[in-house]
Amino acid sequence: MHMKRKDLIVLNYQYEIPTFMQNILYYAGTVFDKIYYVYPVSCADQRLHSQYSKVRFLAIPREKAYQRVIKLPLYFLKKDSWELLLRAAGNKLPVVKLTEIIAVHNIWADCFVKAVSRMFENGLADKENTVILSTWFSSEAMAGAELKRKYPEVHFVSLAHSFEIDCLRNPYAAYGYNRMKHHYCDHVFFISDVMRDRYCRDVRNIISGRDLDKTSVIHLASRKLYPERLVPGSADGILRLLSCSDVVPVKRIDRIIDFLASWDGRDIEWTHFGKGSLFKEMKKLAAGKLVNKENIRYRFMGEADNAKIHEYYNSNVVDLFINVSGSEGVPTALMECMSYGVPAIAAKVGGNTEIVSERNGFLLSADFNNEELSRVINRYSDMTDKEREELRSAAYTSWKEDYDCSVNTIKLLREICG
């Protein structure tokens, strides 16, 4: 009988630990004996390390990545690199951008391969007992593929989300060494049916059907920090909306501001958590468009860690969560709001339709307008108290049945350990 592997090595190129990985690390200790998290050095998440007593964090100094710039000519001599460049040229994609992608993939993959190889050489992990988990189907997955080629006895799996695999959102998603990654990966776990289907369609000409069989869908889900809390709706006639996202173009925060500027109905209080490249611009836009709107109040809360969001749910009233992003994977924020019994309004993009339905919330057209959003707000406002409570109950039930982290994450961890 095959013994379950008990060493887990997680590869992540991000300087901060994303929410879904915080959840995986939280539960990993129930399945694995030794857990290593390999990532670029950063001070930002040092405060999180103490939460995971069984996790050992191994940071790659930035200078290690800079040192590998000298190897750039060798990266472009690879057969796989030439194949990408020729295919991109044939499809009339700008080669300059692709060369940047090739460089970043190879530099970080090389850093991860060197770091993990040293772990094996120093006896920190046993190759035959190890699962390598790539957090994204990006440079980490390329590193995992190189490690699998170097050490065939390891078990290599990868998560796949949205931007790194979705050619509609990212035209270069098909040029990230997918053939090699997929060939050496023992299994790819997509976070939504939509993304798996889209990926399989986009790569069918470069990846064999047998390799595409090494895929499945796992909903990463969300962790509820206040298990007993169900958020009530407003009782004072004010409609309280909450949104949570980076303030970047794809999140379309300007659409919310435009809607509020056009709204002449009941009083609305909108709260947004998150920061990003358009943060100052959106605050200025709101100040200009909403300055004379006596029925609108709004707050930009700025950047907040995940615990702060949960604290907000624990101590505030929220009627509806709103997500108007132009592209999504399966957003954790939607799962989190439903875990507290808050219905959501969401555009029909990506995995949003796998979470939100007419049973537990409201779906907008992908390219909705103010009138459509107004109709949704009025539908909610016209509901009886009983109908609103049924909607909130359905939101919580949807999370409990399909997106409870304590169930889904442990299922994933048990599956990848053998």
Image (cartoon, rainbow, N blue to C red):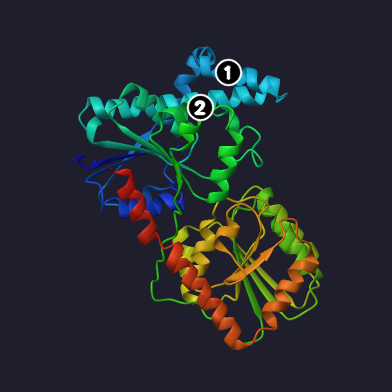
Image coordinates of residue 226 in percent, x first then y, are: 40, 71
Circle 1: element type: helix
Mark 1 → mark 2, Cα distance in angstroms: 10 Å
Quadrant of residue 228 within the rendered picture: bottom left
Image coordinates of residue 9 in percent, x first then y, are: 32, 38
The residue pinned by badge 1 equals 83
Q: Quadrant where the C terminus lies?
A: top left
Which disc is residue 179 wearing? Answer: 2
Q: Which residue is found at the position 57% from the left and 49% from the top?
A: 194
| Camera sees residue 316 | no
Image coordinates of residue 290 in percent, x first then y, are: 77, 68
Q: Quadrant where the N terminus lies?
A: top left
Say above or below: 299 vs 145.
below
Q: Nearer the viewer, residue 87 or 294?
A: 87
Say above or below: 295 vs 221.
below
* Callout 2 crowding tier (Cα within 10 Å): few <14, some 14–19, many ≥20: some
Left or right: 298 in relation to 225:
right
Circle 2: element type: helix
Q: Which residue is found at the position 44% from the left and 30% from the top?
A: 62
Q: Amino acid at mark 1?
A: Glu
Q: Which residue is found at the position 62% from the left and 50% from the top?
A: 276
* Callout 1 crowding tier (Cα within 10 Å): few <14, some 14–19, many ≥20: few
Q: Nearer the viewer, residue 5 or 122?
A: 5
| Numbered label tally | 2
Left or right: 361 in relation to 156:
right
Which disc is residue 404 wearing? Answer: none
Whether label 1 touches label 2, CB < 8 Å: yes
Q: Nearer the viewer, residue 57 or 10?
A: 10
Q: Amino acid at mark 2?
A: Arg
Q: Earlier in the sequence, mark 1 or mark 2?
A: 1
